Amino acid sequence: MSAAEDEERPYEGPILYYTDQVVDHFTNPRNVGSLEPGETDGYACVGDPGCGDELKLWLSLRGGRIAKIAFKSFGCPGAIATSSMLTVLAEGKSLAEAERITDDDVVEALGGIPENKKHCSLLGVRALKAAVESCRAR
Ligand code: FES
């Protein structure tokens, strides 16, 4: 097939359509970074062996609520956007309220995410639950 013929063929691969909210949280992620050991009440590091992505999450409590939350992600745009949105949803919540945040909540807050990227939000939700557990264990 010539290069000209190849250019005329319609693209047949998967189409990744990201909403404006996903693009915003990927390009301008909220709460990126880490917390100092002295202010950290909960911490978790989780990974997705299927794609190699990893997420670290720190929590700091004040008056029983999440006063500060920070994350570092080694992951795809979906993982970064969903982790960023997760931190926005979790901030100010009690531990019990934070535990009830689901991956559907995160995806809905982002206005949706491509089907083959839906698992990305699981990373953040798993990390949040593990960080809440580590708060309780202190
Ligand atoms: Fe692995 Fe997104 S592709 S978390």
Image (cartoon, grey):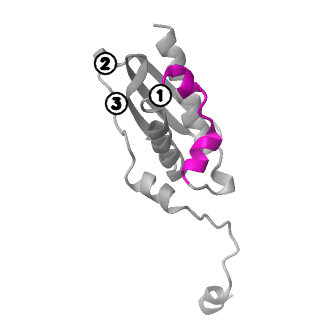
**Alpha-carbon distance for marks 1 and 2?**
17 Å
Quarter of the image holding residue 12?
Answer: bottom right
Residue 97 locus on image (x, y percent): 55, 26
Nearer mark to the viewer, of 1 and 3: 1
Q: To which residue does mark 2 refer?
A: 39
Nearer-N-terminus badge (1/2): 2
Which contiguous range is marked in magenta? 94-110
Residue type, mark 2 in image: Glu
Tell me which secondary structure the magenta stretch mostly adopts.
helix
Mark 1 C-beta closer than 8 Å to ligand 1? no
- Given residues 64 and 135, the one toward you in this image is 64
Q: Which mark is residue 93?
A: 1
- Given residues 1 and 94, the one toward you in this image is 94
Identify the residue at horizontal 51%, vertical 11% (top origin).
136
Residue 137 locus on image (x, y percent): 50, 8
Q: Secondary structure at mark 3?
A: loop
Nearer-N-terminus badge (1/3): 3
* Residue 112 in view: yes
- Given residues 6 and 64, the one toward you in this image is 64
Q: Which mark is residue 127?
A: none
Q: To which residue does mark 3 refer?
A: 34
